[in-house]
Image: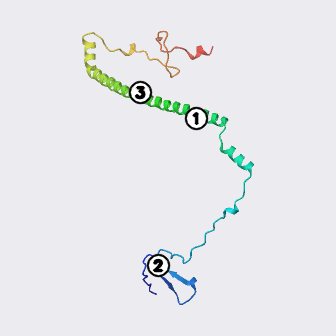
Amino acid sequence: MAARVSADRRRPSLHRRNSSDPRQMYVYGNAAPKPVYEPERRVESPKRRKKTSSQVKQNRRQAMGINKGYVVFLAFAAVVMLFVCVNYVQLRSEITNRSKHITALQEEIVALHEENTTKYNAVMDAVNLDEIREKALNELGMIYASDSQVIEYDNPTGDYIKQYDEIPEEGVLADPADLQK
């Protein structure tokens, strides 16, 4: 069934299907039609209002009023909040300043580390181990140690040791048989 074009384009066209029953009405379009009637609005009459007693009115006035204790409490709460806010702002400022100081110190450490590395590399490049060996052998008369002059030391604990005396010729500090006595 073809749709009819209505004169007012804002309202959808209505079609009925071979029936006079309004429940079987089709609505084409995206807007529902405006109802033919307006619902009645109920207006309360001033006669219906209940009279409030004087005690209720007095209680309401007291509840709406502010007494001295409440004012003191509010003033104290405001002072405490102001104190907390000021301290918070000071702490945030101090944290920011310390963070900036830490960043500056870290940059200084990086610069010193780079300078140290540069100087270390310069010293290492300046030292020629072959030249030192030649000078020690030829000018100073040093010689390599023979196998009989080398004493090997066995560390029983496998850890570091503090040396208070000379290492014995045998290379053993304590005999396990002496320790068990």
Q: Is residue 100 left or right of residue 73?
A: left
Residue 36 place in picture, x, y as percent? 54, 78
Instruction: Look at mark 2 in the image and give the residue it sits on.
Output: 12
Looking at the image, is 40 positioned above or below residue 154? below
Q: What kind of residue is marked 2?
A: Pro
Instruction: Look at mark 1 in the image and give the residue it sits on.
Output: 78
Instruction: Look at mark 3 in the image and give the residue it sits on.
Output: 101
What residue sits 71% from the left and 46% below the top?
58
- The numbered mark, 3 or 1, whose residue comes first in the sequence reads 1
Residue 173 place in picture, x, y as percent? 52, 14
Tell me the crowding category of disc 1: few under 14, some 14 to 19, or many 20 or more residues within 10 angstroms, Cα based: few
Placement of the C terminus among the 4 image quadrants:
top right
Q: What kind of residue is marked 3?
A: His
Residue extending furthest toward the bottom? 18
Residue 89 place in picture, x, y as percent? 49, 32
Residue in the foreground of this view, choosing between 42 and 113: 42
Tell me the crowding category of disc 2: few under 14, some 14 to 19, or many 20 or more residues within 10 angstroms, Cα based: many
Q: What kind of residue is marked 1?
A: Ala
Q: Secondary structure at mark 2?
A: loop
Point out the frontmost of discs 3 and 1. Answer: 1
Point out the frontmost of discs 1 and 2. Answer: 1
Residue in the foreground of this view, choosing between 19 and 7: 7
Q: Quadrant of residue 43?
A: bottom right
- The numbered mark, 2 or 3, whose residue comes first in the sequence reads 2
